[in-house]
Image (cartoon, rainbow, N blue to C red):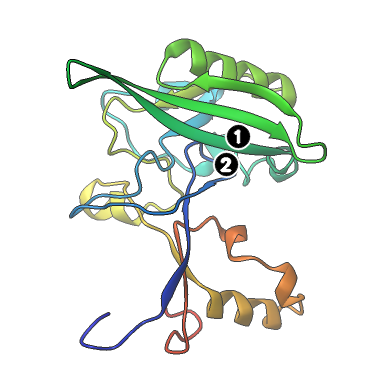
Amino acid sequence: IIHGLSLGKITGLYRYAVKGLSGDTLDTVQLGPGETFPDDRRFALLKTTASDEFDPQNPTWLHKENFLCTFTDPQLMAKFRASYSTQVTMTDQECKNKGMYLSLYERSTNEKVLGPLDLSTEQGRQDLALFFSMQSGSPLICITADRNSHQFGNTASGWKQKRDTRTIHIVTESTVKALGSAIGNDVKMLSPTRFRPNIVLSGENLRPFSE
């Protein structure tokens, strides 16, 4: 609600832990000022040819052409459904560690083909990179930044303006409907999740392309 005007309702919340893989549906998310969705695009499959361009202690924005993702190999990434969850271990009322578990399923059969892998560990990230290196035929490394505020997103605007990669991607159902009509696509076949949003909004007051 802004200035007493309801802008619509939230119809979907999504997180994409690994750049290029499918997202997880969230029931709720709690955000503070300047924060983005927890673990959203926190991991990425980097081509080894670009490994010299990434420093986990001083990460910068990299173009998506440097990664295995839906931009560089949409057919391969679409073959798998990812499931991601976190688990915190407590010791004497204190957080000991945070496990970040990823499993992969073959979409055509719904059979689990990998995982759960703990991406908070070097071994888990190596296993994920090895799997997709074999699938793609190109050597990859699974990377993450030392600070959890870094995202492997597509847009460079935040980085250019203030050296910040954090983004919350908002898509409205009215935009998707208008786009589907413009390209002659069956609106029912064009889902908002096609555009990998964090938040999907619907409402009569939301004009197409008002994001």
Q: Is residue 130 left or right of residue 122?
A: right
Which residue corresponds to mark 1?
68
Which of the 4 image quadrants contains residue 52?
A: top left
Q: Which quarter of the figure is the N terminus placed in? A: bottom left
Depicted 89 relative to depicted 189: above or below: above
The relative height of residue 123 versus residue 20 in the rendered view (above or below) is: above
Residue 55 in sight: no
How far across and how far down the image is residue 18, in percent? 51, 36
Of residues 29 and 147, the one nearer the viewer is 29
Position above or below: 170 against 114:
below
Q: Residue at x 61, y 82 (%)?
A: 178
Q: Is residue 91 left or right of residue 115?
A: left
Specify few, some or many for label 2: CA neighbours under 10 Å numbering under 14, 14-19, or 20 or more: many
Q: Earlier in the sequence, mark 1 or mark 2?
A: 2
Give the camera-side residue of 175 and 158. Answer: 175
Q: Which residue is mark 2?
A: 20
At x 42%, y 40%, the residue is 152
Residue at 42% across, 59% down: 169
**Residue 111's x, y, as percent?**
76, 30
For the C terminus, give its image quadrant: bottom left
* CB-based contact (under 8 Å), mark 1 and mark 2: yes
Q: Amino acid at mark 2?
A: Gly
Rendered residue at 62%/79% (across/down): 177
Q: Which mark is residue 56?
A: none
Most extreme residue toward the front, as rendered?
Answer: 92
Q: Nearer the viewer, mark 1 or mark 2?
A: 2
- State the image coordinates of residue 30 (x, y, percent, origin top left): 28, 52
Alpha-carbon neighbours of circle 1 within 10 Å: few (<14), some, or many (≥20)?
Answer: many
Query: What SS does tag 1 mark?
Result: loop
Instruction: Tell me which amino acid carries mark 1.
Output: Leu
Q: Position of residue 173 (x, y in %)?
A: 54, 75
